[in-house]
Each structure stands twice: as C-alpha cells, then as structure tokens.
C-alpha cells in the first residue's frame, strides 16, 4: 500500500496566475445556470399568446435569435388573466410588462409581442455575460468552498 499526500488550497490561497487559470477553465467548462428555465418561461409566454417557439440560439459571443411565427398570435388575449404567472416569475412578469408598455404606445399587438421576446433575449444574454464574468465565477467558487490542487485542478 502507498499513501499519497496532496496539498489542497482554497481559491484565495492560489497564486494570481493559477486563479486566472481556474477562472478561465471554469468559464469554458461549465454551463449557464437557469438558462434552460428562462427558455421554458419564454416558451410559456409565447404559448399564452398562441405562438410556438420554433428554434433559438443564445450566446453572448455570437448572433442570437429566437425564431417563431406571429401569424397565429392571439390578438384577443386578456393580458390581465396572465397576472398570476407574472407574480410567480420575474422573467415572465418582465416580458408581460414590456408587452403592455409597447402596446400602450403603439397599439400594435404583434410589435408588442416581438419587443417582449426581444427584451427576454437581451435579459438572458446579459445573464450569460454576467455568469462569464470573473466576479461571478470567483464568487461561485468561494461560496461553494471548492478545494484546488496547486496547479488549479478542482479537488
């Protein structure tokens, strides 16, 4: 039998170069938190207006889109009936408020719907950008009290 001793370090105990390496490794090897939930909320919002999200691609580094066809848009929807969904979820409420704001100024339901979806897309991309930030990654690593080897490998 052989015993191996490994020195472990907290993030703040690593050298600056190794901390930078850990952050870069984390940035490129981890998925975004909550993004799938946000997409589901956008799909639900669209469905409430009788729209189906056909495809999407969201990235802070390349062209992003949410594809749908507004030809089935329910123009008779009672937006007040959606209040409970607004109260249950921030993103849904954000989209509904944007829809109502645009509708108040333009009286165009299709345009208002498109703007609500666009605002949600921008919201998600900003969240992705934040989750890629050094500040967020360092906070997440520290909060979860991860241990690292001297070369920055997570233990």
Image (cartoon, rainbow, N blue to C red):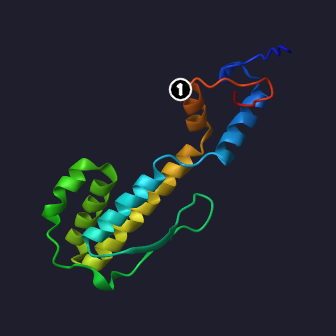
Residue furthest out toward the front:
1
Q: 113 or 50, which lies in front? A: 50
x and y percentages locating residue 1 in the rendered image: 85, 15
Residue 119 visible? yes
Task: Choose top left, top right, bottom left or bottom right for residue 27.
Answer: top right
Residue 105 sits above or below residue 13 on the image = below
Residue 20 sits above or below residue 129 on the image = above
Q: For the point 17% across and 56% down, which residue is it?
A: 83
Residue 66 visible? no
Q: 141 or 2, which lies in front? A: 2
For mark 1, give the secondary structure: helix
Which of the image's four quarters has the C terminus?
top right
Residue 125 sits above or below residue 13 on the image = below
Number of numbered labels in the structure image = 1
Q: For the point 53% across and 26% down, which residue is it?
A: 143
x and y percentages locating residue 53 in the rendered image: 40, 72
> How packed is label 1: few (under 14 Cα within 10 Å), some, or many (20 or more)?
few
Q: Is residue 43 left or right of residue 135?
A: left
Residue furthest out toward the bottom:
71
x and y percentages locating residue 92 in the rendered image: 30, 56
Task: Choose top left, top right, bottom left or bottom right for residue 3.
Answer: top right
Task: Choose top left, top right, bottom left or bottom right for residue 45.
Answer: bottom left
Mark 1 sits on what residue? 143
Q: Is residue 83 left or right of residue 14?
A: left
Q: For the point 55% across and 27% down, which residue is it?
A: 144
x and y percentages locating residue 73 in the rendered image: 27, 80
């Amino acid at each position: 039998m052989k015993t191996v001793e490994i020195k472990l370090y907290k993030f703040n105990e690593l050298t600056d170069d190794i901390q930078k390496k850990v952050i870069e490794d984390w940035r490129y090897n981890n998925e975004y938190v909550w993004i799938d939930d946000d997409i589901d909320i956008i799909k639900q919002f669209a469905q409430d207006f009788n729209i189906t999200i056909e495809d999407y691609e969201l990235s802070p580094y390349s062209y992003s889109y949410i594809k749908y066809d507004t030809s089935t848009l329910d123009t008779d929807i009672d937006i007040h009936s959606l209040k409970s969904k607004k109260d249950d979820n921030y993103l849904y409420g954000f989209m509904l408020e944007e829809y109502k704001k645009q509708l108040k100024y333009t009286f165009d339901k299709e345009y208002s719907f498109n703007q609500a979806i666009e605002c949600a897309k921008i919201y998600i991309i900003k969240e992705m950008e934040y989750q890629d930030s050094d500040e967020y990654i360092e906070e997440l690593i520290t909060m979860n009290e991860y241990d690292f080897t001297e070369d920055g490998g997570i233990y």
